[in-house]
Structure formats: C-alpha cells, structure tokens
Amino acid sequence: MNEAIYQQALKDLAQAAHGAGRLAGHDGEALRDNPLCGDRVRIEIVRNAGLITALAQETRGCLLARASASLLGLRVPGQTPEQIAAVARALREMLNGGELAADAWPEWAMFQPVRGHRSRHGCVLLPLEALLQALAA
Amino acid sequence: MSWDVSAVRRQFPFYANLEHPLHYLDSAATAQMHAAAFEAMGAHDIHARSNVLRGNHRLAEAATLAYEAARASVARFLNASAAEEIVFTSGCTAAINLVAGALAHSLQAGDEILVSLAEHHSNFLPWQRLRERGVLLRALPLDAVGCIDFSRLEVQLGNRCRLIALTHASNVTGALTSAADIAAVVAAARAVGARVLLDGAQRVQHGPVDVRQLGVDFYAFSGHKCFGPTGIGVLWGRREALAELPPFMTGGGMVGRVAIDESSWAEPPRRFEAGTPPIAQAVGLGAVLEWMLALPWERIRAHEEALLLRLLAGLMAIPGVALFGPANAADRLPVIALRLATHHSHDVCQVLDSRGVAVRGGHHCAQLLHRALGVEETVRASLALYSDADDVDALLAALHEAARVLA
C-alpha cells in the first residue's frame, strides 16, 4: 500500500516542483492553509485572452500536496478557467471513489491510491483549491 | 511487582475487539475508554436516565445522585477541598473558555494575561480573543528543546497581569511543568493579584493530581484523555476564585431568581452549568476516575518510563531522527515529538498506519510551539498505561520502513 501511494512517479513529480516560485507580476493570487497540519500553498496566476498563461506555486507540505501543486505548474498554463473547473470536478470525483474522467489529466491517476484515506484528500486538493480561489479573486 | 499490561488491556474493550493488530500510540489525542466508563454510562442510561437537579421523581433523584457522586469522584481525583469546586463542562477547551469568557467581564483595557508559547491552541486562543477588549497578551518563550523558559517570568509578568494560563504538560513534547516552576508562578501571580490556571489535559492521563498542593486557582481537563468518555470535561476552581466569576453561559439550572429586569445567579458550580449537562458522560468519568484512584501509579510510572527510554534509545539509532522535549525522562510524560529527516509528518504517519502503528502528525494544535522549534509539524507518539514494548518496537520498525519508502 505504501508503495502504491508513494510510487516513484509521484515522488518524482513532487521533486520536479513544476512552477515553483513567484511571478514578477500576476493578476490572481491565493494562499490556502491545511488546518490539520499547517501546510500552506500560494498560487499566483496570469490571465490573458481567457487563458491562464502562467502559474507559480509555493508549497510547504507533504509529498501529496507538493506533487499536486507541481502538476498544476506543469498542466495549468494554457488552460481556461472552465477547463480547470472541470479538472477539479474530475479529481474530486475520483477521490470520492469514481472513475477518472476520460478527458481528465492522466496524472491524476497517480493519486488514486489516496482514495481510501479520507484524511489525505485535503493534501491533494489544497493546491487546486488555492488555484480556484485565485481564479475567483 | 511490575505493571501487568495484559491484565489492564483486558479491562479495555478496544483491545478485546481489535480485528487487526494495531499499536495505538495516540493516547495524547484520545485515550481508549476503560470498561468502567462503558458500564457506568450504559447502566445509568438504562436505569437512571433523567434530567438532574430539577425533578423530584425517583429517576430524577437517582440521576442527580449519580451526577453528584461523579462530581465527588472528580474532587477526590484532584484532591479538591470540596465537590462544589468541580464544574462539569463539555471538555477541557470549554473549561478554559469558561474562565476566559467569565473573566472578560471584569477585565479593563491594559490588563494583561500571561501564557506561554508551549500552549495548546485551547489555552491560547481564548486568551488571545481578549485582545479585542484591549487586554495585553504576553507569552513566556521556550528554550531550545521546547520547554517553557521560566527564567523570563519576572520580565513577562506585568503589574496588571490578571491571570497566568499555562500547560501542566505539553501535548507535543511531553514536557512537564515542574512543581517548583508552578510554585514560582503562583508566588509571582499572588504578588500582582493574578489568578493561575493550569491546562491539565495531558497530565491527568498519568495519575491523580493534587490541586491544593499545586496552589493554583483553576485546573482544566477532559474525560476522553483519561480513559473516560468524550463530551465531558472538568473545570476545578478554588472556591473563592469561582465565586468571583459571573456566569459564562446562561440558561436553565444556573439561576437563583429570574425577574423581567434582572436575575440572580446560582452559587458555583451550578452557576457555570447552564442547560442539561452531559450526565451519562459525567457518570462515566466518575467511574473511570475511581478506577484510576485505585491504581498503583508508582509501578505504572516506572513502566511508562521504561517504555519511554526504550523508545528514545531506538529513535536515536535511526538516521535522520530529530527529537524535541526534555532529555530527562523524569521531566516529561511518555509523549514524544519527532521529525524523520525532512519527511512530512503526514507522509510518515501514512506509512506507519500501513504497519498498524497509530500516531499523529501535524502541528497538534500547537503552531506557536512548532514555530519556536523551527518546524511546522512533527510526528507525535504517545504512550499510556496499556502500551507495551511491542508497541514501541513496532513504531521503531515502521519508522525504518518510512525512511525507506519516502526516500
């Protein structure tokens, strides 16, 4: 079970820390804390012509949170807010036991072993919730 | 004669009903409940379920007697002067909030409250909220291992201090606040006319407390941390300290006479028990405290200390483990906070759980303490009187596994 959650691909994704850092200028920002452990994610975004053109993330958290944030850094630039909303729905449905939607980011599949661990869902969702908050700001 | 863990485990339904092996090392969060509490609560709700301190039919009489007997048991456990010094609450948090809320009425802008950076949020946030009234909140700092630095007491204690609120034992490092330090705090408080409150949430699990010997004014704890039910807590207050507080909550059962313009309040403890109290839970707590009062605590402490030393020795042999709290076992409860290299505590706990080891990760509702130690979160293992060497060894083996899996 440990190997399923902490598979090498997930550890590599967390280690890669795509989008890590801050943006010189941004038009959306959000800071989210996980009340359980004090983990914190800051998301900054730049939007242009209906697209998110840049994303930066600062994540202090567990492997799951860092991998999830890294995936945002990798995948979000070039997406629309509507696409992000759909991606967020797909992730939540998968964590709640559903199948991963066919058009969802395939990397979400590496979080499937977390489904049975309710207390860890928040770790995976924290960066995405910060992104949604930044988009709503 | 050594402490017989197998025998005591037979008194805990949790151990009799385990479907899979589980090393429960999270008693600092919630201890398992003793059979005496299950039985007392069940019997009460079958044979004497009624409201208390209100009716005069036979069930109401029986319920009131049981409720007040539980109050007397708590008084014995704390060596209080009288049962009337015991207020039942819904928990330790509610007990501390009761004092803060009641005291707030008499505080003026510029008055001071002194806490420490070691406090659980339950003994910090109620006092921090008083800043809205212009109250100044001061905090004793910590030393390098996370113990309260009492050498700063004189500096931090102002002439307008009205209350000093400190932990009796840290829920993170297990560090005990010594009798000598408490005596110094009480003396300093008396010099400026301040009251002293101790948060006993962690300490009560490890044996009866003598509040008269401690010399403090208020003592708070929860039932679920001393092998009793959830939903019940205790505020002990020295008779004169309780008497000077107005009610925190108002409602049924806590009044003298009610008139349209003004009402009078009942004497303590009823003044602080508005509404129907957690009756069955109080009865369960009373039963479990009576069980605890009869235990051989010297043997239990020797047992817990031996386990603590075994754990500390094993942890120090694991590469990358950083430990917090006092080095001397006599200065701490068997509660240990640690970091495993740079691995996040929730990742470590996940691996430990897969090996049947239940510990807690996170900031343990003590963010200030963690920041003072230069970390955000820790893994916490807490031992109780039903813990054994197998539990300790399982934790150590699982930490080795976590280091491998998370690398």
Image (spheres, coloured by chain):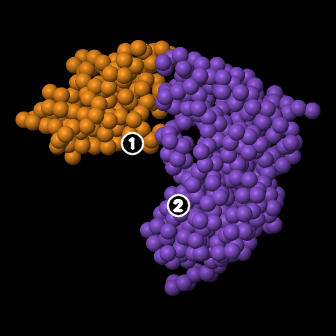
Chain colours: A orange, B purple
Using the rendered view, name the quadrant where residue B300 is placed: top right
- Judging depth in this view, the residue of B154 and B268 nearest the camera is B154
Residue at image point 66% right, 62% down:
B197
* Res B51 visible: no
Q: Residues within 10 Å of mark 2 (few under 14, many from 20)?
A: some
| Res B11 → quadrant | top right
Q: Is residue B28 above or below residue B267?
A: above
Q: Secondary structure at mark 2?
A: helix
Q: Residue at x 51, y 17 (%)?
A: B405
Q: Chain of mark 1?
A: A
| Circle number at residue A33 | 1
Q: Amino acid at mark 2?
A: Pro
Estimate the x, y position of residue B40 in percent, counting from the top left: 76, 46
How many badges with numbers are in the image? 2
- Give neighbour class at mark 1: few <14, some 14-19, many 20+ (Cα, 10 Å): some
Question: Same chain for the residues at labels 2 and 1, yes or no?
Answer: no
Output the chain of dot 2. Answer: B
Query: Is B36 in front, or is B32?
Result: B32
Question: Which SS class for mark 1?
Answer: strand
Task: Look at 69% across and 64% down and name the residue there.
Answer: B185
Q: Is residue B12 above or below residue B366?
A: above
